Amino acid sequence: MDETGHVSNNDQISQASKNEQNKGKGSDESQRKKAVRSQSEVAKENRCVQKIKRKRESRQTTGKIPDHYGKKKHAVTKKNEFYSMSKRPCGYCLIINNYNFEGPSLKKREGTDKDKDNLTRVFKNMFFEVEVRADLQASDIQNVIKEFAERDHSQMDAFVCCILSHGEKGSVLGIDGKQVPICELTQPFAECRTLASKPKLFFIQACQGNKAQ
């Protein structure tokens, strides 16, 4: 700038040169940032591609299962997770059907014969040898349970017991009104050696208290 306050041509040229240099520096900085961003995006895309490849490779090693189905663990079930039920007859099915009760306090169990017939049909269709015992006193129930527990079940795969009667809490009743604890019905079969490691199924149709349902 001269004494009159005007900017000389040389000063204008110098200032323009500085502006061009600053503009060039800004452009270089912008290009450098763009290059850094571009490299970061490329690296991110490469990581995603590698991750997808690893997933596909891990799925392909599971066998013939398509890539879009991940192989489930324990997909093959071992044979020893099932009971063998192939023998014929498959087992005994004992049905104790109490209908006529002694004394006025216990009513006849209307409809029990229908249940007995349905159970007989179902278990015969499942290849069980069905035996029905009707109107047993408490001592008779215990005796028939003992009889079946002492039988040889070695050529059979299971045992089923269905008891249709009146009952009290934790017990069933004979037609004489006397109680037979449920544990006394199941325990003899737990001690039966020819039924060891075989299914022992008990179906009990009997009230377990005095309250109405």
Image (spheres, rainbow, N blue to C red):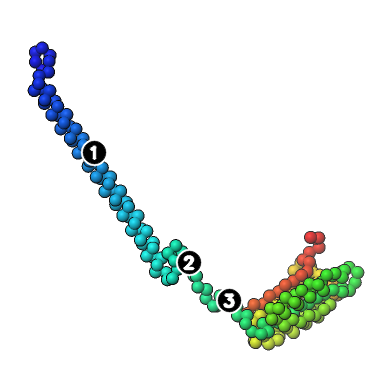
Residue 83, can we see it?
yes
Q: Which residue is mark 3?
A: 82
User: Compared with residue 7, is residue 178 higher up or lower down, i.e. above or below?
Assistant: below
Q: Amino acid at mark 2?
A: Lys
Label 3 vs label 2: CA separation?
20 Å
Residue 184, can we see it?
no
Q: Looking at the image, tell me whether mark 1 or mark 2 is earlier in sequence order.
A: 1
Q: Looking at the image, tell me whether mark 1 or mark 3 is earlier in sequence order.
A: 1
Q: Which residue is mark 1?
A: 30
Per the image, label 2 sits on a secondary structure element best described as loop
Give the label, 1 or 2, closer to the camera.
1
Q: Position of residue 75 (x, y in %)?
A: 50, 70
Q: Residue at x 26, y 42 (%)?
A: 34
Label 1 vs label 2: CA separation?
51 Å
| Nearer to me, 201 or 66 | 66
Furthest residue in direction right, as rendered: 104
| Nearer to me, 188 or 153 | 153
Q: Is residue 106 left or right of residue 93?
A: right
Please rate how many residues cluster around mark 3, counting C-alpha atoms within 10 Å: few if below 14, some from 14 to 19, many from 20: few
Q: Are marks 1 and 3 in contact (CB under 8 Å)?
A: no
Q: Position of residue 179 (x, y in %)?
A: 80, 73
Q: Residue at x 81, y 60 (%)?
A: 212
Q: Which residue is mark 2?
A: 72
Furthest residue in direction top, as rendered: 4
Per the image, label 3 sits on a secondary structure element best described as loop
Please rate how many residues cluster around mark 1, counting C-alpha atoms within 10 Å: few if below 14, some from 14 to 19, many from 20: few
